[in-house]
Amino acid sequence: MPKDPEQFRATLLAYVETLRRTGRRSIRLWPGWRQALRSISIPRQEGISESLSAAQASLPQEAGPPQESIPNSLSRPSTGSPEPTDREERVRRLEALRQATAGCRRCAHLAGSRSQIVFGVGNPHARLLFTGEAPGAEEDRQGEPFVGPAGKLLTRMIQAMGLQREDVYIANILKCRPDLPPGTPGNRKPTPGEMETCLPYLREQIDIIRPEVIVALGATALEGLTGLRTGISTMRGTFLDFQGIPLLPTFHPSYLLYRPDLRLKRQVWEDLLLVMKRLNLPISERQRGFFLIPSQG
Ligand code: URA
């Protein structure tokens, strides 16, 4: 759950709007949301927002369990830190953060199992930042995010946008590979505790780079940055807000590898077209037509 009520409010309203557009008239409130709803005001509107206001009004007034505040010197102060004034300052801060994370042992089990920290890669002045979930085996080996099979697909997606990997910034919610019992193949999803512990690093990276758009690749990235545990299929293609930066959720490239379906590819591509539009990047007719299903053409 976002700690900042304004961010929570913006995220919730975007979520409600998505539900409204897709014809839904009810919303599932997680316990944490009930707690947070007490502290924000929701405008009275037709449809779902109205029932949200009602839900808010009918919430019991007794205080819930106190929200544990995670002590962390890396999280952005609520007043907002000054924006980096020049490019050198941005590079300096990013490098300082990289060095600060290099020996991180906040999750002792991950520190013990990783080969190295996978900090992030790309342009410190990027207008576009992609975040995934956590390093896989190849990323852990090379120390760079998205260099395995899903990463190769992400690179092709970036190139399809007319960009290079070096133009954007690529990071993950978790900087360590989630451990698995020795000999177990594959990856595992980070636990909520691991995410909460590691997220201040990504928040700080975003604070330094101040990209114009963030793309959250997959449900874990969406949950990490917004607190939303709604399915990625519901939220993809809708711009949300992360501390004033438009955030677009879309499917994770590994999902596309797992389900090589042209419709899914087109959905992701349409999301990336929205990002290109938001960034005023040129879009050719050819690009507009990528992954079009013949009957759509
Ligand atoms: N999947 C991710 O989420 N991140 C990576 O770096 C690689 C695969």
Image: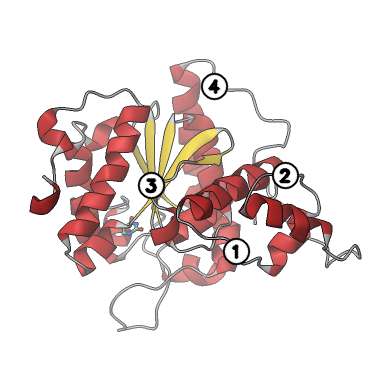
**Which element carries disc 1, helix, strand or loop?**
loop
Cα–Cα span, label 4 and label 3: 30 Å
Q: What type is the residue that disc 4 sits on?
A: Pro
Q: Earlier in the sequence, mark 2 or mark 3?
A: 2
Report which residue position mark 1 lands on: 26
Residue that badge 4 annotates: 84
First of labels 4, 3 by sequence position: 4
**Cα–Cα gap, marks 2 and 3:** 25 Å
Q: CA distance from mark 4 to mark 2?
A: 38 Å
> Which amino acid is tagged 3?
Gly
Q: Nearer the viewer, mark 4 or mark 1?
A: 1
| Dot 2 amino acid type | Arg
Colour scheme shown: secondary structure
Q: Which residue is mark 2?
A: 44
Looking at the image, residue 16 lies above or below residue 97: below
The quadrant of the picture occupied by the C terminus is top left
Residue 174 in view here: no
